[in-house]
Image (tube, grey):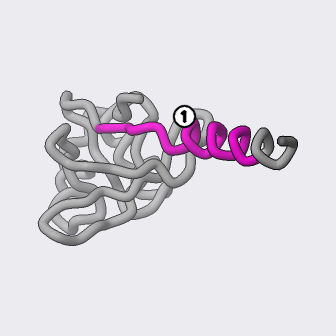
Amino acid sequence: MKRALAVMAVASLWTLGAQAASLKDGGYVGCVTEDYLDQFISAAVGSDTKGMEFLMSGYKCVPLSSKFEISVLDTGFTVSQVRVYAGGGAVELWTVNEAIQR
């Protein structure tokens, strides 16, 4: 009986940790490193369109869409690392927490 309760407790914790998440639409980006995300945010806040274009044109940052399926890998205070599945492949990106619908 105790073992069954322990298995149920672990299973319920695993289910909580595996809750589905998705991306929101609204102009959010994902970047291949947390540093590139910081650079993009600084450029956006400073209205530095050339800086944002540089990061986007080199695929250091890409626009995100609710059409993509994701897994949340790591969640910080303001940013998270996600795995984005698209076109039969996947890429790990950093994005702001506000971009993730939980």
Foreground pick, 98 / 11: 11
Counting from the top left corner in percent of width and height, residue 73 is at: 51, 54
Queried whether the magenta region covers residue 8, the answer comes back as yes
| Quadrant in which the C terminus appears | top left
Give the residue at x 46% y 37%: 19
Q: Is residue 22 above or below residue 7?
A: above
Give the residue at x 38% y 38%: 21
Q: Which residue is mark 1?
A: 78
Please state the total of marks drawn on the protein image.
Answer: 1
Q: Give the residues in magenta.
A: 7-22
Name the residue type under label 1.
Answer: Thr
| Quadrant in which the N terminus appears | top right
Foreground pick, 87 / 50: 87
Q: Is residue 88 left or right of residue 85?
A: left
Identify the image quadrant of residue 5. top right
Foreground pick, 37 / 76: 76
The secondary structure type at the circle numbered 1 is loop
Queried whether the magenta region covers residue 73, the answer comes back as no
